[in-house]
Image (tube, rainbow, N blue to C red):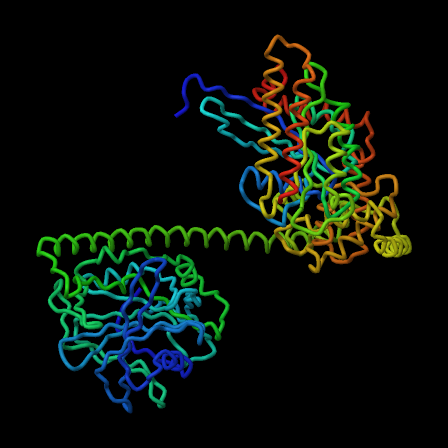
């Protein structure tokens, strides 16, 4: 990735975000304290607005980002103190892809300030050894060509780059210019002054503040895939952990010794190095995963083609062929599942629509009866069917459907009636088969022809046969374990 | 640090009762200190293991058998009950029908499993979901006391898996009974006299009083 200094266009929206942050929008040096008490990550950020029409304001202002007002926003800033002019340099991280989206979350936090999932950008650290950088990522709507922050790195460097213009909108944009006077080359050649405290830029990590960075790995994958849903309303920025500004102890405390300073500097660099390595490994893994995913998707596409064009039209002749079996074992693509299941299960019982309607009617009448024991049992089990899907809960989308379906089966087959566990099988049919009638047909026929029938009807002879077969298979496949159970 | 002379016991405990009475919830609460309204229905049987440091030299492992509540599985219960030394029968105070079935479960239990000396295994009755409005007999503590005495339960507790009420106490009581039985077995394998029976009812009385207070 490139880390050239780049102009950053700010949309009206972005500006709004920024302005919302800066309640006193006239003063444009805003220090937002991102109070991540959880991860103890402290970020000092500043945003300097000095667009053509806007005056430079030297005042530093401390403000807490209010995330409730807007989805999120982060103003990263850093103010330099050696002079009247506080300037910051914002670098935009350029993605190789034209439309890359970076997802970042900045949720409203329960504690005040901003909760940020900031991730450490390895590249940015490499480019900014000796300086601190923060990358800001925002998700944006691609259609909105002006809207930006697609992927930004706010970086403060010593170099006297050309001015960086953050704003393009005439109504007073946010303009960021590099600080020419600040030289961050060495470690601790100059100091930042925030809240009356001196901060030393990059040279050392303040260990007490911790470098616990919430690494947002998803961000990375989203960069590369670029397939994020484009959600304009969710304009967010992420700040890289490199925004951590290692700084000196507060004035009132004794200063660090040279030795300590050096030590911290070393530690900081080492941390950066480690982070970089970690990120590289992660990105490699992501790439690999993506490749596998793509491959799988391609396979699926081919499989769908084969199923719909070759197998399904000639079901009877194809159903027991080797090719079909092999393909089947790889898993049915969801779009053909309904069709294949219906065909594979068939309708030996000849359940017609009339029978189905009759059963449904019975079931509806019966389900009003709260004293009906079977119905009560069914009712108790519905919400306990695939509970994590949250589809079968009371008032869930399939609560009534499953209830009716099982009650219909009770009417249809009074001998078996309802057996605990049926709800799972029935739920699978409801979820996968397009029409309810077909789902019911499949359900009834499936229970009729499968092993379930034997166990549901307590056909002892057949049950024993099943047990014997199971034992044989067990012995054949896991002889050692089998011996353990049958000494 | 386990001492070399530490005794360890493994006990198989059954948890039975009508469908949806909260057997799984009780076990999850007891073993994992956790409650969720979204358990799946138990099919067949589930297991859980609870380790109790009973005292300085005793570790007790309870193997809890969570048995499906539907009557359908009734003829499987003999397999499940094998070698159990204690049981909880759970009913749901919000549904009177689940209490009506308690006796059926108790009889099933006593018919299918006994201690080596022929006595029935200790069994504690749990009136679960006591955090919710009760229905029927669950409102009448004296009646339950009577019922418990008549049907040879070790005792009963109002429990709530949701609010973690009385579950530990109930388990403690059951383990106590099991240990007593073990002692009786160890002491020359004699048929238990009426002694433990007396202590049972005594214990039961105190427990009942506890229930009233809650």
Q: Residue at x 42, y 68 (%)?
A: A101
Q: Is residue A270 visible?
A: yes
Q: Nearer the viewer, residue A118 or A325?
A: A118
Query: Which image quarter: residue B212?
Result: top right
Q: Residue at x 63, y 22 (%)?
A: A476
Residue A480 at x, y percent in the picture? 56, 20
Query: Is A437 situated above or below A99?
Result: above
Query: Is A216 situated above or below B64?
Result: below
Query: Is B205 situated above or below A31?
Result: above
Q: Nearer the viewer, residue B151 or B164?
A: B151
Residue B206 at x, y percent in the picture? 63, 33
Q: Nearer the viewer, residue B68 or B12?
A: B12
Q: Residue at x 70, y 42 (%)?
A: B21
Query: Which image quarter: residue A80?
Result: bottom left
Residue A167 at x, y percent in the picture? 33, 83
Residue ranking furthest to the left: A258
Residue A34 at x, y percent in the picture? 33, 67
């Amino acid at each position: 990735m490139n880390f050239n200094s780049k102009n950053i266009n700010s949309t009206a929206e972005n500006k709004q975000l920024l302005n919302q942050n800066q309640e006193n929008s006239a003063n444009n040096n805003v220090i937002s304290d991102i109070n991540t008490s959880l991860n103890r990550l402290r970020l000092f950020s500043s945003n300097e607005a000095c667009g053509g029409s806007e005056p430079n304001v030297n005042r530093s202002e401390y403000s807490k980002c209010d995330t409730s007002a807007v989805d999120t926003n982060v103003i990263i800033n850093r103010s330099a103190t050696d002079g009247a002019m506080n300037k910051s340099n914002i670098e935009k991280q350029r993605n190789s892809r034209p439309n890359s989206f970076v997802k970042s979350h900045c949720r409203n936090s329960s504690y005040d300030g901003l909760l940020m999932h900031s991730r450490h950008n390895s590249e940015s650290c490499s480019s900014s050894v000796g300086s601190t950088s923060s990358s800001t990522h925002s998700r944006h709507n691609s259609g909105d060509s002006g809207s930006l922050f697609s992927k930004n790195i706010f970086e403060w460097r010593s170099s006297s780059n050309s001015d960086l213009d953050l704003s393009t909108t005439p109504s007073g944009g946010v303009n960021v210019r590099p600080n020419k006077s600040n030289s961050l080359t060495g470690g601790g050649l100059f100091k930042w002054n925030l809240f009356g405290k001196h901060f030393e830029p990059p040279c050392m990590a303040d260990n007490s503040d911790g470098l616990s960075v919430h690494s947002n790995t998803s961000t990375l994958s989203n960069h590369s895939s670029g397939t994020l849903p484009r959600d304009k309303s969710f304009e967010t920025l992420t700040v890289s952990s490199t925004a951590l500004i290692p700084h000196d102890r507060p004035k009132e405390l004794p200063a660090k010794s040279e030795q300590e300073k050096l030590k911290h500097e070393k530690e900081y660099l080492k941390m950066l190095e480690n982070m970089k390595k970690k990120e590289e490994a992660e990105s490699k893994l992501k790439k690999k995963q993506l490749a596998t995913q793509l491959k799988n998707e391609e396979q699926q596409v081919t499989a769908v083609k084969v199923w719909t064009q070759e197998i399904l039209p000639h079901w009877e002749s194809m159903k027991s062929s080797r090719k079909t079996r092999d393909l089947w074992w790889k898993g049915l693509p969801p779009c053909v599942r309904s069709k294949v299941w219906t065909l594979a299960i068939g309708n030996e019982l000849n359940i017609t629509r009339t029978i189905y309607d009759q059963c449904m009617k019975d079931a509806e009448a019966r389900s009003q009866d709260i004293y009906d024991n079977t119905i009560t049992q069914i009712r108790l089990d519905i919400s306990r069917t695939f509970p994590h899907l949250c589809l079968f809960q009371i008032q869930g989308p399939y609560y009534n459907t499953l209830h009716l379906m099982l009650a219909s089966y009770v009417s249809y087959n009074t001998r078996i009636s309802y057996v605990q566990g049926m709800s799972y099988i029935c739920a699978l049919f409801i979820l996968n088969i397009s029409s309810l009638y077909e789902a019911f047909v499949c359900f009834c026929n499936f229970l009729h022809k499968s092993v379930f029938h034997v166990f549901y009807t307590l056909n002892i002879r057949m049950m024993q046969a099943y047990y014997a077969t199971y034992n044989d298979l067990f012995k054949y496949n896991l002889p050692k374990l089998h011996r353990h159970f049958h000494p | 640090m386990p001492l070399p002379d530490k005794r360890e016991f493994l006990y198989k405990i059954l948890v039975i009762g009508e469908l949806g009475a909260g057997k799984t919830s009780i076990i999850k609460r007891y073993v994992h200190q956790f409650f969720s309204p979204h358990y799946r229905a138990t099919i067949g049987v589930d297991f859980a293991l609870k380790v109790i440091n009973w005292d300085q030299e005793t570790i007790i492992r309870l193997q809890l058998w969570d048995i499906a509540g539907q009557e359908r599985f009734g003829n499987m219960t003999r397999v499940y009950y094998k070698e159990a030394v204690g049981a909880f029968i759970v009913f749901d105070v919000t549904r009177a029908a689940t209490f009506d079935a308690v006796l059926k479960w108790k009889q099933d239990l006593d018919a299918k499993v006994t201690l080596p000396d022929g006595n029935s295994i200790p069994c504690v009755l749990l009136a679960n979901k006591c955090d919710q409005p009760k229905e029927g007999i669950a409102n009448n503590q004296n009646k339950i006391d009577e019922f418990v005495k008549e049907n040879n339960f070790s005792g009963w507790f109002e429990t709530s898996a949701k609010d973690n009420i009385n579950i530990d106490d109930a388990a403690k009581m059951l383990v106590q009974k099991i240990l007593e039985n073990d002692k009786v077995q160890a002491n020359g394998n004699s048929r238990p006299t009426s002694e433990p029976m007396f202590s049972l009812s005594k214990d039961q009385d105190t427990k009942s009083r506890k229930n009233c207070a809650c």
